[in-house]
Amino acid sequence: MNRAGLFVPLGVFVIIAGFLYAGFSLEDPHRLPSALVGQPFPEFDLPLLANADERATTQRLAGRTVLVNVWATWCPTCRAEHHELLRISDEAGLPIIGINYKDNPAAAREWLTRYGNPYEFNIIDADGRLGVDLGVYGAPESFIVDGDGTIVYKRVGEVNRRVWNNEMKPLLARLEALDDG
Amino acid sequence: MVERWFAMLLLGVVATAWGQGAIDAYEFDDALQETRYRDLIAEFRCPKCLNTNLAGSDAPIARDLRRAVHRLVLEGLDDPAIRAHLQARYGDFVLYDPPVRTDTLLLWLAPIALLIGAAAAIAHMARRRAVTRLDADDLARVERLLDERAGSESPLGSESPPRPRSAPGPRSAP
């Protein structure tokens, strides 16, 4: 009997264990890898939440770095991240554009009056069409869009202090350094 | 008899309706568009659900995507363009068949590699089994050794290490 042959099952086991290890250390399987990072922000022309007679287009984002936040009053996690958005708009001075996603506009306006308004302006995506263009599959979702209109970051789920400190803030600092350089 | 046939037909219709997760009332210009729409929503995976297609999901996002597919079909996009449209927004996740790329090559090649490995293993085992089959010379030698062993209770000389007396019969000699 060939002694080396004895180690074949061990080798097979190590390979299988390796794949299982990699498979189980993947992040939450519900989290989709974002297809949109590095892509231009999709074109839109949608009514404003504050005044549905007025419309906003993609032009309103141009020339600066903004945080685009997809939210709705039916979304409990949106409520949870709301105070962090308020803090970001206050302290970090980052403009936040809201996309009120498949929501009741009256309820959304009331929400902003009651909990405070971190948004520079809100657009109404009543049927979720811009949501589809943004690859949204659950609110809240947040995007950082740079001055060229390119999506440089996407976050599915709550933006909290940890996400801000560990991911968004360093990224914004890098963008700023690029602009200065 | 007729009644029974009718009952089975009815059951079939009802079961088919239940099998569909969601039915939207969409209008199409022609039957081909509708067929394409049905095939496409059966083909895409709902982003919110881990293993349900768009056709079978009640999730609001699946409804939005069905609406998007319907719109794109009406706008005259062909199937590859619609696939690209959804893939650009929701990534490979929405496709049940991942595209062949360098980072997905393993996914596509692993089954073939496993098949080849299994075939090689089976061939190897078959060959080993073939080697243990003895030809006439081997048989003669076995006979001779057994005879020698039967003649003297001593071990098999230089051909094998000495073994304890309690060891099972000479058949266990290599």
Image: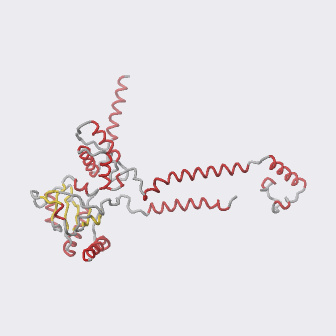
As drawn, A88 above or below B112: below
Please give left or right for residue A147 compared with residue B164 in the image: left
**What residue appears at the point 55 percent right and 62 percent down from the top-left corner?**
A14
As drawn, B100 above or below A120: above
**What residue appears at the point 59 percent right and 61 percent down from the top-left corner?**
A10
Q: Residue furthest top?
A: B1
| Residue B19 x/y as whole percent | 34, 41
**What residue appears at the point 84 percent right and 62 percent down from the top-left corner?**
B158
Please give left or right for residue B158 compared with residue B40 in the image: right
| Residue A42 x/y as whole percent | 23, 58
Q: Quadrant of the N terminus of chain A?
A: bottom right
Please give left or right for residue B162 compared with residue A147 in the image: right
Quarter residue A152 falls in:
bottom left
Q: Which one is in front, A25 or A147?
A: A147
Q: Which one is in front, B132 or B108?
A: B108
| Residue A74 x/y as whole percent | 22, 58
Q: Residue furthest front?
A: A181
Please give left or right for residue A57 compared with residue B89 in the image: left
Q: Quadrant of the C terminus of chain A?
A: bottom left
Quarter residue A75 falls in:
bottom left
